[in-house]
Amino acid sequence: MFDSSTITLIFPWIILGFGIMATMLASSVRIETRLPAKLLTIFTLVLVMITSAKLFNLDTTITINGFIEVSHLSCMTLFFISAISLIFVVGSGGYLEKEKLHISDFYNLVLLMVLGASVLVSAKDLFVMFIALEVMSLPAYALVGFRRNDSRSNEAALKYFILGGALGAVYLLGASFIFGASGSTQLSQIFEWSKIHNGDVLLFLVGHILVLFAFLFKAAAAPFHFWKPDVYEGSPVAVTGLMATVITTAAFVVLVRLFHMVDFQSQSFVPYLESLKQLIRVVAVLSLVVGSTIMILQKNLKRLLAYSAINHTGYILLGLLGTMSKPEQIYSVWFYLAGYAVISCGLFLLLSQSETRNDQGLELVDLTGLMKRNPLVTALASIFFLSMAGMPFTVGFFTKYTVFMSSIASGEVVFVIIAAICTVIGAYGYLRPVALMVMRDPDPTAAEFNGTKSNQALIIMLAVLCLVLGVFPQALIQLTKGMELIP
Amino acid sequence: MENSQQLTALLIWPMLGSILAWFIPKASQRIYSLFISIVQFALVIYVAYPVITQTGQGLEQTLPWLSDLGIQLSLKLDSTSVWFVLLSGFVSFVVLGMKGQWYRRNTRLFSSMAFFLIFSINAAFLSSNLIVFYLSYEAVFIPMILMVGIWGSSTKANSVFRFFLMSFFGSILMLVSIFYLSYLYFLKTGIFSANLNDLLKLSNENSPAMLWCFAGFFLAFAIKVPLFPFHGWLKEVYVNAPAPATIWMSAILSKLGVYGFIRFVGPLFPEAILSAQGILLALAAFSVIYAAFLAIQAKDPKALLSYSSISHLGFVMLGVFSMGASAKTSAIVLSVSHGLTSLVLFYLYDLIVKRKEDVSLEAYSGLAKKFPILFVCLFIGVLASVSLPGTFNFVGEFLVLIHAYPVSALCTILAGIGVIFGAVYMLKFYQKLGFGVSSDAQVAEVAEDISGFDLIVIVLILALIIYFGFQPSLFLGGMTNV
Amino acid sequence: MNEPWMMLIVACTVFLIGLMGVIFRKNLLIVLMSVELMLNAVNLSFVTFSKLHNSLEGHISVLFVMTVAAAESAVGLGLVIALFRTLKTADSDQIQILRD
Amino acid sequence: MNLLLIVLFPFFGFMINGFMQLRSLKTGHKISSKQSGSIATFAMVLSFITAIYYFIQFSGQQEDGRLIEQNLFSWIKLGAFHVDFSLRLDSLSLLFTMIITGVGSLIHLYSIGYMKEDETPAKYFSYLNLFCFMMLNLVLGATMPHIFLGWEGVGLASYLLIGYWNQDTAKVGAGQKAFVMNRIGDLGFLIAMFIAYKYVGSLDLVDLQKATLSPKIASVVGLLVFFACTGKSAQIPLFTWLPDAMAGPTPVSALIHAATMVTSGIYLLTRISPLLLQAPDVLSVIAMVGVTTAFVSAVIACAQKDIKKILAYSTVSQLGFMFLACGVGAFDAGVFHVMTHAFFKALMFLGAGSVIHALHEEQNIFKMGGLSRKLPITTFTFVMGWAAILGLPPFSGFFSKDEIIIQSLHSQYGNQILFIMALASALLTAFYMTRLLVLVFFSPSRMEKETEEHAHESPLVMTLPLIALAILSLVGGFMHHSEGGHEEGQSIMIASVVVALIGAAFAFFRYRKFDKEEMTNQFVEKGLGIDVFYNKFFGNGVPLLAKGLSKWIEEYFIQNSMKFCTWMVEFSGSVLKSFQVGSMQVYLLMMVVFGLAFMIWILESVMQGVIFYGK
């Protein structure tokens, strides 16, 4: 049971644990010991990436004690999450320095969050999921409120915390109902139960729906999205970026697992499949509409991106909708998440370079006439914004392409049309900042963008990645196609 | 169909030009862009030559690009697309040779975007895979928006947005239609494909779904062309855009819509078109007259030219919707001739504007005396625009109308009335600019008559317009076997 | 067999009380307490189901939940204190700077 | 000899003069009227000589051998549709060619003198040659589209020449009016071609002449072609552009608006006469329109004061006679009148030009008078023209006009109404022409002193064409062997001469001693309100309609619907945004409410096994 091969399988988490301990030690020695903490974090994350990469193309799915799954899917996500975190850790040093937040605790919390997220994506037990969710969320709350002297940051953290806590309790209640109905908290056993179960499923359904709500909340799908704009606006940019990428990815992996928790072939769950699809349709359309229409009214850039995230959630849900009847289309969700993460990584890092005159955060008007003053940043930002809008030859196009294709393939034409219209509305929202940057004359009160060379290089790499994936997305698609969902 | 490797060159070369433009010093950008575009045009001629001469033969090339997504990079140059590709090659060369004030600002970006535009236009005209077509069709927006936005005149942001949003709205619905078509194909055969050749197998189906798909396509192209109720974006954009962008839009991008109708909509949805033919023809004919009326009341000469563009494209659409090989060929001829004519008119109008200090519109008068050669050229352009016999436009318009007449006499006559109004507004345009008493104050002091590159190119185009007015067999002969 | 369902009703009631507390109480500390109440209500339901299924899983879960709840309240209190320092209030109605 | 030469000479003249003009603009070197004019005239003369060559060739041949066809190249060929670019010469087109090149040469010659003081004579002569080139294309073209090429081409040249002095926007406006009104007619031409192609399958004139169509189709085609002719040949309803076209230089009026271009309608009708004969209804329409035009414009001419306007309305009236001839099936008579009219009307226009030239651009006949002594040659030749148009024997007009009047009664398609109206028109013609003649040349002088002193006879280069045309006006009538001469014909002939003499005598006695300006009826002088009506109705109506469309449809409907879309999106955004109140407790409440709603909905649908959507 505890043999050497298992150790290899859980290596990434062990490394993460050691990393957390090390950074904790470093910060307990002196809180200003940034460099060692940063180096330790980078080292840890690189190691995690290496170890998880070694586990790629695992041809079998190994479940440890029914709690944790080690599969191609989990390893890929783990690798991906740690890579994104690594980019943020490397890229946000300047920002933290500027905001005077640069203490080793930051790295400690980031690593904790990564640990939580990485366990979350591999969790095969409702309870493990809860623990992992909390391990991910608690550092996230702290990170959102990292600017301790800024009331906005505090407010955002508190809102996030209270709502997250309440929804965590909702999740637990749902989990307990599922446990009550099926007699187990392990997903595989629940799946087996659903296969043979014949009879009343009310308790299970209530539990399942509650559980879904909790993670729809984490993924910020309308109407569970209210926290997102406020939290995005209040939190430090680097943290917003982490939330937009790491937490969203983890939440969606869990959502996919939860949606596919039961065997819909089973007699007692056949009508439920249709109802669930209906739920996803409604939530997806709501997210699309809410995200796109409110986005075009925003003045604050981070808020705009929050609504854009809600909009993107809608697209991903559309892809998910396709998988409900055609599970092999699941790759569209993964691909979308990956593409979206690349774009938002770049965009948030870019925003973290800005220096505004006031501390209201970066307003849209702060971008006025940026092209004349800083063409590089303008070009990069335009690439990211156009990517978000789904313009051709950027990764954003193919992400949308795959989810549309997946839902068309399951016959959801009407919803694809709605999504298409929302894409147009959203495109307007993304084009506004581009137009401001490109078409206006510079405004003396507008924001400055100063980044270190390494930082710039990182963002340029991400932008190039956006474009390369926009022309040759095959590699990524091949990888994501391997990420099959095993109940 | 011959398999050919040359077609990718038409894509690679402008893309290369677009990338390399960033490494060329500002001072030599014009030479650079001229060089790239001349080579590009030469390439187009080289590739297109066998297609033009061997009637009915085309070139084909298929590269596996994203086969797992149902996307193949299949390029096809046949007698339909060859004229559009040639036209775009020629127009791009002329546009990049123009001397203009927009070169002073963001020079590198301009050349880069220009070649990216050429790249996407070529890709759109060449691709016979609908997804690739959509991709390039959509990619055209990016340089276009930037051009209008950065180098355009004031009050541009709104017009750009309107242009972008309307076009994007149409084209994304087309994308959904494409998806749905390939889904239908999937249901039929079990393979996902967006290749035109595959999807054509669906064309004889007459189901509501096909009608909806047709609607998606129609909307996209009708906005692009534009047809009557979908033209709202056009005027502001044309007026505000810098001359190269205006020329590109009216000479080439509108042809993207026409091409889309001819290449995709016609073959894919013959049933749908036939069932809606009356409405479609009426829309086209109404576009002609409606835009002519708008042109009559337009105060701004550039707005007048923009409306005239809509009006002439109405004729093209009349030909397209008449269905049948001859009508289609006529529509292509008219498209090419309209491309050349609008190139001349917008080009010369830009030269005139540049020669005036005062840009206010009432201030035009009596310039013909100041710039006689320029105005002689403009006059021939105006004559071509009113499609006087002996010009290329006449051939196109005459053929379109004579082939539309048996289909719908009423619409043809309606569109014919547009011919009269065409004379009214074009003469008004010319008279306003050229005739009357000139006052020296309006003219910039250094202003000279047209000369150099401008003169050579314009005379060349006008010569072509007149030559093809008498010898259009090049266009007609190659296309009879379509 | 009636007994477990009764317990479940109790659990749900407590959960709802907690939820109401979170929604309607204005003092942040009471809101925090209400969250704890919700978690404890879930504990009750876990124990009930554990008994129903004769399995230990639910009992173990309770322990975990309590631990997590403790951690959560630590973080929560920290956040409330930080907010109190900047805004000088613990009234939930006062924290509405971020909106629209 | 090559048929192409006839066409090419004027074309080369056009090119040479055009290039010279452009060069002179560049270099600033001025080209004299003599230089450019002699090139242009030489081109025309060469063309005329070529035409004479063919005339000689034709006269040696039988009637049916008089046909030369020359296929130049294939013009438009698309599928079944095929049009060649070929020239075809038969007796009809030869006659027109000779008129065009012959009268054209004389007018070119005249122009050298007339345009002596002009700034850009090369431009003028290049336009003039362009006109001749296009006109020759019109009469020599073998297919309908080829004729259409010439048809539109002469319209273009006419536009350019009417607005020749383009500094004056009113003159440009007159040119524009001519072009647009011609284009209205051209639409008829186009549609006629479409219909003809649909039912005949070819646009070659030979095929059209041979074709037998159903009466309905033949009527439609005939009517449409006739409509085109009313545009070009200034008949009711499209005649109002011709008086305005007098804004151009006088030789232009002589060549284009009297002798050649305006008669192309007759040419076209004669060309498709087999088709028209299949549709008698159309013929009667043509006859009615022709005679009405003749009468109405003769009435208007009586009230004109401008010498060129009188001649213009007179031209319209004479064209009406020609259409009357066509309408009663006497196409020969119509064509004959085209020729004689070309001689005497060109003569009168040139004479008027000579007068205007002498009086420094004075055109009001009430400010002239007694010019017979100052301008003896002009007077003499003008009297010849006068006699011709009145139809006094043995002048040319006598033969052609009386032929028409006879035919209007005696032809298969003729009737009394046509005859009486034609006779009335002849009476009016005699009246206003005599009025013109007397007021200008014979009545007491009403000129200002200074003008009178400067008045002098024109130079030889201008009088020579006058003399030549006067001779032609005298002998032109004998070039045609009339088939008339039967009993009734002779009485009608006498009647018409008597009528003309009555009209002339009346005018002579009325205006002999006239020394003040006549108070004419304004309504009549303004063209019976037809032009005013057109201006009001179309001139204002079209811009008004355009404004209305742009305001109501473009602005209110199209632009506003786009604005509405954006507004709707923004509105729904702001409504949705209003949920974002900022209080986390409200957020939670909303989530609970939505969550409960979802929960109940899902559970209900599952419990009932209802599937809402999809399937």
Image (cartoon, coloured by chain):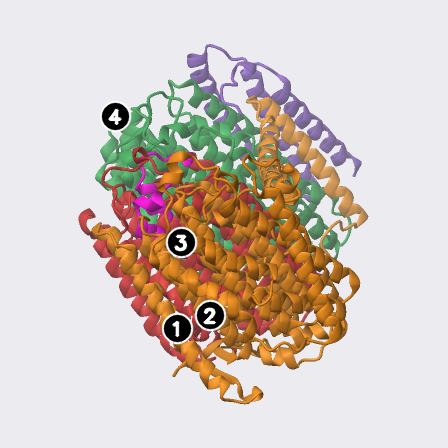
Chain colours: A green, B red, C purple, D orange
Marks 2, 1: nearer the viewer? 1
Q: Most prominent secondary structure in the magenta stretch?
A: helix
* Residue denoted by label 1: D47
Image mark count: 4
How busy is the neighbourhood of tag 2: few (under 14 within 10 Å), some, or many (20 plus)? many
Marks 2, 4: nearer the viewer? 2
Residue D109 percent across, percent down from the top left:
36, 61
Q: Secondary structure at mark 3?
A: helix
* Residue denoted by label 4: A30
Above or below, D452 relative to D357? above
Chain under label 4? A
Same-subunit check for callouts 2 and 4 = no
Q: Residue at x 44, y 54 (%)?
A: D378
Residue B186 seen in the current view: no
How busy is the neighbourhood of tag 4: few (under 14 within 10 Å), some, or many (20 plus)? few
Q: Amino acid at mark 1?
A: Ser
Above or below, D262 relative to D372? below
Point out the image quarter for the C terminus of chain A. Answer: bottom right
Lateral position of residue A245 relative to residue D234, left or right: left
Residue A172 percent across, percent down from the top left:
60, 36
Question: Is B368 contained in the magenta span?
Answer: yes
Q: Which residues are magenta?
A: B349-378
Q: Secondary structure at mark 1?
A: helix
Q: Quadrant of residue A140?
A: top left
Numbered tag placed on residue B379 in the rendering = 3
Numbered tag placed on residue D591 in the rendering = none
Q: Amino acid at mark 3?
A: Phe
